[in-house]
Image (cartoon, rainbow, N blue to C red):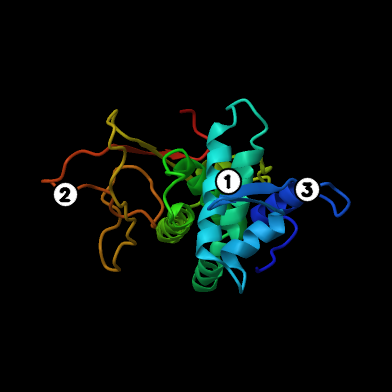
């Protein structure tokens, strides 16, 4: 079995089920033919994944573990369900690490949590007498991890607009320089429509040799023309006032 870090979901389940070395661990009593065998937790896993695993004994382990989990009360401590999850874990590591090698930005704890949820959800529908009950649980957990990985890697991260706005608004604006004595202020009032303001406003410098600005006000030479095309829709009102003038 592949080990995981101390903060991983699978590692926490390992520690919870096995407990400390001096803890008295529960046994799993399974019926094989006319015999009743008492297996430790490690022996139960060995029957499923060990080098000398036995298909008949493995089916008996799954049958007893699933039956015990389904019979425990909903308001109980969930030890039976957690034991089933613990028995499934060794069958998940290969696909878990394949996914992590393929998509390195995925969080391992999230993948492991998805697998655990899949096992618990499938446990309510699996048949304990099915010789492949463990295979059904493992398959659902593996499929859930792959589905989660493909879904998350298709997502495009976006900027948190609210956090960005709060950070911007909390920044103290530097003191603005005073308006020049002959400067101009631009005010744009969009019409009351949901579409908002959709236009590009250009300020063109007059060509040499022309008679100056086409406006009746004393605008600086920078402003030569700011008008809309005669066939375009009105998108707002543009007002130019001398800097510091009353609005």
Q: Residue at x 42, y 57 (%)?
A: 143
Q: Which one is nearer the viewer's eye here, 115 or 17?
A: 17
Residue position for label 2 = 229
Q: Residue 81, how many percent across, how many down?
A: 59, 41
Q: Which residue is drawn at 71% across and 51% down?
A: 12
Image quadrant in which you'd find residue 194: top left
Image quadrant in which you'd find residue 166: top right
Q: Which secondary structure lies at badge 2?
A: loop
Q: Which one is nearer the viewer's eye here, 139 or 156?
A: 139
Q: Residue 9, how many percent across, how many down?
A: 65, 52
One can see residue 169 in this view: no
Marks 3 and 1, the one that precedes in the sequence: 3
> Left of 200 or right of it: where is 141?
right
Q: Residue 188, how many percent across, how many down?
A: 37, 38
Residue position for label 1 = 65
Residue 25's disc is 3
Q: Which one is nearer the viewer's eye here, 171 or 136?
A: 136
Image quadrant in which you'd find residue 210: bottom left
Q: Which residue lies furthest to the right in this view?
A: 22
Mark 3–mark 1 distance (CA, rounded to whole Å): 15 Å
Marks 1 and 2, the one that precedes in the sequence: 1
Q: Residue at x 32, y 51 (%)?
A: 201
- In this rendering, which labeled residue sits more in front, label 1 or label 2? 1
């Amino acid at each position: 079995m592949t080990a995981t870090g101390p903060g991983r979901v699978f590692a926490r389940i390992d520690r919870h089920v096995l407990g400390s070395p001096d803890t008295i661990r529960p046994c799993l009593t399974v019926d094989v033919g006319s015999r009743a065998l008492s297996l430790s937790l490690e022996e139960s896993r060995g029957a499923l994944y060990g080098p000398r695993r036995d298909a008949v004994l493995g089916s008996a382990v799954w049958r007893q573990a699933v039956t015990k989990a389904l019979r425990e009360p909903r308001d109980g401590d969930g030890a039976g369900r957690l034991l089933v999850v613990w028995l499934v874990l060794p069958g998940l590591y290969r696909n878990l690490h394949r996914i992590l090698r393929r998509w390195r930005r995925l969080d391992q704890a999230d993948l492991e949590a998805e697998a655990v949820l899949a096992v618990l959800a499938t446990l309510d529908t699996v048949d304990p007498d099915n010789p492949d009950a463990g295979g059904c649980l493992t398959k659902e957990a593996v499929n859930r991890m792959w589905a989660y990985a493909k879904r998350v890697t298709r997502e495009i991260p976006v900027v948190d607009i609210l956090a960005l706005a709060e950070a911007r608004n909390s920044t103290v604006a530097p003191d603005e320089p005073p308006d020049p004595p002959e400067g101009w202020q631009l005010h744009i009032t969009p019409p009351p429509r949901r579409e908002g303001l959709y236009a590009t406003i250009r300020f063109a410098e007059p060509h040499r040799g022309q008679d100056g600005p086409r406006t009746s006000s004393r605008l600086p030479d920078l402003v030569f023309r700011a008008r809309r095309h005669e066939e375009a829709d009105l998108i707002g009102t543009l007002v130019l006032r001398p800097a510091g003038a009353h609005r």
